[in-house]
Amino acid sequence: MLATIILTAETIGVIAFAVSGALLAVEKNFDIFGIMVLGLLTAFGGGVVRDLLLGLVPPVFFSSYTMAGLAVLASLAVFLLYRFGGDMRLLSGRDITAIVNFFDAIGLGIFAVTGVNMALEHGFADNPLLCITVGTLTGIGGGIIRDIMAGEVPSVLRKNVYALAAILGAACYYCLMILGIGILPSVLAAAGLTVALRLLATYFHWHLPRPRS
Amino acid sequence: MLATIILTAETIGVIAFAVSGALLAVEKNFDIFGIMVLGLLTAFGGGVVRDLLLGLVPPVFFSSYTMAGLAVLASLAVFLLYRFGGDMRLLSGRDITAIVNFFDAIGLGIFAVTGVNMALEHGFADNPLLCITVGTLTGIGGGIIRDIMAGEVPSVLRKNVYALAAILGAACYYCLMILGIGILPSVLAAAGLTVALRLLATYFHWHLPRPRS
Amino acid sequence: MLATIILTAETIGVIAFAVSGALLAVEKNFDIFGIMVLGLLTAFGGGVVRDLLLGLVPPVFFSSYTMAGLAVLASLAVFLLYRFGGDMRLLSGRDITAIVNFFDAIGLGIFAVTGVNMALEHGFADNPLLCITVGTLTGIGGGIIRDIMAGEVPSVLRKNVYALAAILGAACYYCLMILGIGILPSVLAAAGLTVALRLLATYFHWHLPRPRS
């Protein structure tokens, strides 16, 4: 049950992040292989960082044939849709950015949660700093790698309520699990919190204080 | 005694690097959470890289609650000073760069030394290449992560006498410790050497040969 | 025999990647120490990533005194040739880019192969995803670090038939070794495949499909 829920969440997260990476690569007009590479790095970069920090080597990615295949297919689908999908070619850079943002929010929320879960599973439940930081880094890691590879300042520093949304999602999941709330409501509540915060912040232009207005 | 000296140095280094990251984030007008994230990444990035290279997982950062709290407070203080400090808002980008440079030099010197020290403590005293390289990477790592995240070419490639200062500080500390000089004079001499070289190089515009003048 | 062939290949790869990093640093007019740092990071970045993913800590780089010395000498030679070589100063940025590309191709081919080899040697022969991905990352890792440090979008996303060439070389070497073909023909065929693909793709302007033509 736990395994199924986490696996389902991971699958959605991998596809969402692969799509966000592939879309950014489309916007930059990278070739079909560059699109797949950026999709893969976005989908698995956060998880590999998490595994290195927890000492899990080789990282679980390397036995995830199905997940790797899904990420490649998702990236390929983005390319094909854009290349042959007619209407999709009419999308402006701004439209693509908005769609990247949507998929990025989903990946962020899910990976912040599954990152915490991996730390809990490996016996670090008594270390909230580790669990919440590793969860946050799993969530933001793939997007940081995607943005730096594409020559952009990472979303986590640029976008509204981004790091905060990831940290709150990770902390929420950690607390719910420690309190013994079941896995399904914990995943839904915590990942939902992060995704909702990011989407609402984007839609309503919420922003945290900046040095200069 | 050794532990106290290293802990004191680490504390100063963490605060100096957090301030350098937070100031660069202020210059880039990131929001308050982005400022804290960049402060944290700058303060702990080098140490996490060091721990991964030495096989210390999870990295010591994850049990450093006090240090993490100090880095957050230091970053927050930079934001508040800039936002509400009146005079500080009058600082130009150039002034901020100069202050970043000052704090960066302190962090660089201290982390080059504590990086070597961590390698010595873990039984690598007979491998100078490892000790000195790990020390250098601990020193330059946080700044590299800070600069790349902010979209800048890293200081280590851009600034005068930067890599050289870090390597000399790390090598100096390694030699002094191998020679059995006490910990306090070794830390002061080696970290002081790096800090002095960086500040003098900046002040007097020392520079190493370049391909084109 | 096996050890000698791999060592020879590694040596050529280290020098080729150090030269590619040093040349890019020359083009950016970094100082002599920045040039050596970029040469070293390019030559050893991919291998360090590989070792971290395989759990080999400290990474083998840290006991490779000769290799590290060679990379420093190669970077220094690039600087001296450019600074005092007369004719080399007449090279345009475009010429330098072409030479970087040549050395980069050689490093890419060799490290894709030696990366797979390291995974095979450590008992991962039954996991093709791991062997081929680790090989590919060993090949592309140094160049990614080089390009990001220099403020460029990494070659792997920008250049024609780059990721594909690395993956095909790594997969080719994996298959030949699993089939029991000897080490020398396997290395030559697989590294040769990657190098040839990259050079031909550059020369004939081969390119894979892009979203927009």
Image: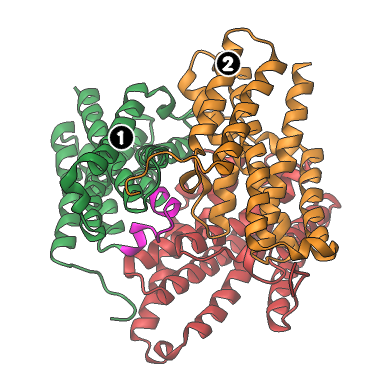
Chain colours: A orange, B green, C red
C205 falls in the magenta region: no
Q: Is residue A14 left or right of residue C89?
A: right
Q: Evaluate whether residue C134 shows in this view.
A: no
As displayed, is residue C29 above or below residue B112? below
As displayed, is residue C13 above or below residue B74? below
> Toward which corner of the image does residue A36 lie, by quadrant?
bottom right
| Residue at (78% x, 41% y) in the render | C127
The circle drawn on residue C151 is: none
- How many marks are shown on the rendered structure? 2
Q: Chain of mark 2?
A: A
As displayed, is residue C34 above or below residue C96? above
Return the residue at label 1.
B76
Q: CA distance from mark 1 to mark 2?
A: 32 Å
Instruction: Tell me the mark number nearer the camera, choosing from 1 and 2.
Output: 1
Give the amino acid type for the residue marked by disc 1 in the picture.
Leu
- Across and down, in percent, residue B178 comes to 24, 38
- Across and down, in percent, residue B159 comes to 29, 62
In the image shown, does C140 or B31 lie closer to the viewer?
B31
Judging from the image, what secondary structure is the residue with disc 1 in? helix
Q: Quadrant of the C terminus of chain C?
A: bottom right
Q: Are marks 1 and 2 on the same chain?
A: no
Q: Is residue A61 left or right of residue B62?
A: right
Return the residue at label 2.
A123
Q: Which residue extends farthest top?
A: A180
Magenta stretch bounds: B145-158
Give the amino acid type for the residue marked by disc 2 in the picture.
Gly
| Residue at (42% x, 48% y) in the render | B145
Q: Quadrant of the N terminus of chain C?
A: bottom right
Q: Chain of mark 1?
A: B
Alpha-carbon neighbours of circle 2 within 10 Å: few (<14), some, or many (≥20)?
Answer: few
> Toward which corner of the image does residue B62 lie, by quadrant?
top left
- Across and down, in percent, residue C96 comes to 50, 81
